[in-house]
Image: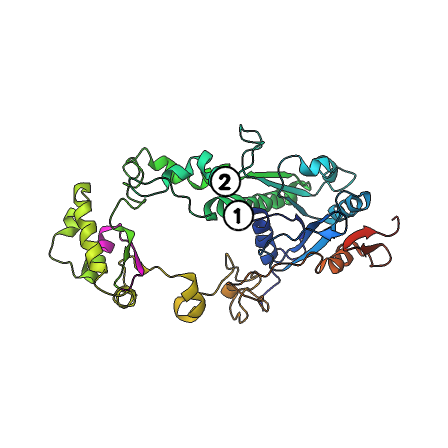
């Protein structure tokens, strides 16, 4: 019998945003936290529909943040919240009277963890500029490392910045602040930014620039596609195999599987002057068979040679390609919530799963589920302490 998810009972106010902020909220909600997204009303009664699909296990409440009643509702929710996620540019919530000096005060909630995320550093030269993932990676230095030989820097869509260096880092900061609160009894402001998050993730790679692992120009090193036995190769059917046979024993397995034994590549592979020739040999070899044929040869071996699966086929062939979405980490005693609908083990998570599972994001309609969350958190009853007027939550009577 497993226990409740690890963050059960944690109350999180997430101001609606895009990408990294909602992703931090998703990590919390998947771990069992009660996450209430605050959607801002536009022109009073009309809710701004945020194109956010990172909504699993969340609820929404529409609030007019330009009205005194709306501000009062946020303050009331903040009094009982554990975490607040601020995804806006610096100063937005402060101008509304909802900054940490107010919400983390003794009068409101000194235990509140006020988590805010920006793209650029809040105290840096770019602090007041707009930007996106590509810009944050650019000024962090990380983007300069990414790309093939002779080509321009190539951004890895927005995985590395928005999600790894942004939302996941903010999530880590929230957990650290929760741990500190256990000791001090006090909340605190958690400030994350994507520039520092991405830069921290690149610590090893930055150090490698001054070692033989990475001291050559971009695209000419061991781990950046410069090395022929750490790269991808097209197969006969236009698909791809990934090769990462860095260690000698793994490279021998690769050579054996490719039928290249007896050509001396095991001894010659370490010399960079031999890399162009070896790459040409590997390119020709991999194009001689289909990806499935290479899978049959290398599956179960230590050649560090695997198929490059595509999400479309992983959705169609979930069992064979292990295409199910699992919790980010397995907790054997208190699993996180499941994404798949047929969870049978702690590694799958617990609970009924979600509609769409791993491949279809379901937008959260503004206002959905928020009324019941207000009742659970505050004990307020709709029609008594609060009401919904033209789609927005309002305080009905002074408390």
- From what the image shows, is residue 53 above or below residue 153? below
Q: Can the viewer see residue 46 in this picture?
A: yes
Identity of the residue furthest to the top in this view: 125
Q: Can the viewer see residue 252 in this picture?
A: no
- From what the image shows, is residue 137 above or below residue 299? above
The percent position of residue 321, horizontal first and vertical second, equals 39, 67
Compute the Cα span from label 2 to label 1: 9 Å
Is the image coloured rainbow, by chain, by secondary structure, or in one colour? rainbow
Please tell me which of labels 2 and 1 falls first in the chain. 1
Where does label 2 land, which residue?
197
The percent position of residue 74, horizontal first and vertical second, equals 75, 46
> Which residues are drawn in magenta?
237-251
The percent position of residue 210, horizontal first and vertical second, equals 32, 33
Q: Are marks 2 and 1 in contact (CB under 8 Å)?
A: yes
* Residue toward you, 376 or 95: 95
Please tell me whether mark 1 sits on a helix, a strand or a loop.
helix
Residue 117 image label: none
Please tell me whether mark 2 sits on a helix, a strand or a loop.
helix
The percent position of residue 292, horizontal first and vertical second, equals 29, 67
- From what the image shows, is residue 119 above or below residue 367? above
């Amino acid at each position: 019998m497993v226990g409740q998810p690890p963050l059960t009972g944690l109350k999180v106010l997430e101001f609606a945003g895009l990408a990294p902020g909602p992703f931090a909220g998703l990590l919390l909600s998947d771990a069992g936290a009660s996450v209430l997204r605050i959607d801002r009303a536009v022109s009073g009664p009309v809710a701004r529909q945020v194109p956010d699909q990172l909504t699993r296990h969340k609820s929404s409440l529409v609030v007019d943040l330009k009205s005194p009643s709306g501000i009062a509702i946020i303050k009331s929710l903040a009094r009982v919240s554990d975490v607040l996620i601020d995804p806006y540019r610096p100063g937005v919530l402060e101008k509304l009277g909802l900054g940490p000096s107010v919400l983390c005060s003794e009068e409101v909630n000194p235990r509140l963890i006020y988590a805010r995320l920006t793209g650029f550093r809040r105290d840096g030269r770019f602090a007041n500029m707009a930007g996106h993932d590509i810009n944050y990676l650019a000024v962090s230095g990380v983007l300069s490392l990414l790309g093939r030989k002779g080509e321009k820097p190539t951004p890895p869509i927005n995985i590395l910045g928005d999600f790894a260096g942004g939302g996941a880092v903010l999530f880590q900061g929230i957990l650290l602040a929760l741990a500190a609160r256990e000791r001090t009894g006090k909340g605190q402001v958690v400030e994350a930014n994507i520039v520092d998050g991405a830069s921290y993730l690149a610590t090893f790679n930055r150090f490698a620039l001054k070692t033989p692992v990475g001291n050559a120009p971009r695209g000419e090193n061991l781990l950046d596609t410069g090395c022929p036995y750490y790269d991808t190769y097209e197969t006969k059917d236009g698909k791809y195999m990934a090769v990462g046979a860095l260690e000698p024993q793994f490279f021998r397995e690769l050579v054996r599987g490719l039928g290249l034994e007896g050509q001396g590549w095991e001894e010659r592979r370490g010399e960079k002057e031999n890399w162009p020739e070896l790459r040409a040999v590997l390119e020709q070899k991999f194009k001689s068979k289909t990806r499935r044929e290479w899978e049959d040869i290398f599956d179960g071996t230590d050649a560090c040679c695997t198929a490059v699966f595509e999400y479309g086929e992983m959705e169609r062939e979930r069992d064979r390609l292990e295409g199910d979405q699992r919790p980010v980490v397995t907790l054997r005693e208190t699993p996180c919530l499941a994404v798949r609908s047929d969870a049978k083990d702690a590694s799958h998570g617990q609970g009924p799963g979600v509609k769409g599972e791993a491949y279809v994001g379901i937008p959260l309609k503004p206002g959905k589920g928020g009324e019941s969350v207000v009742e659970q958190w505050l004990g307020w009853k709709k029609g008594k302490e609060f009401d919904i007027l033209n789609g927005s939550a309002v305080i009905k009577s002074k408390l």
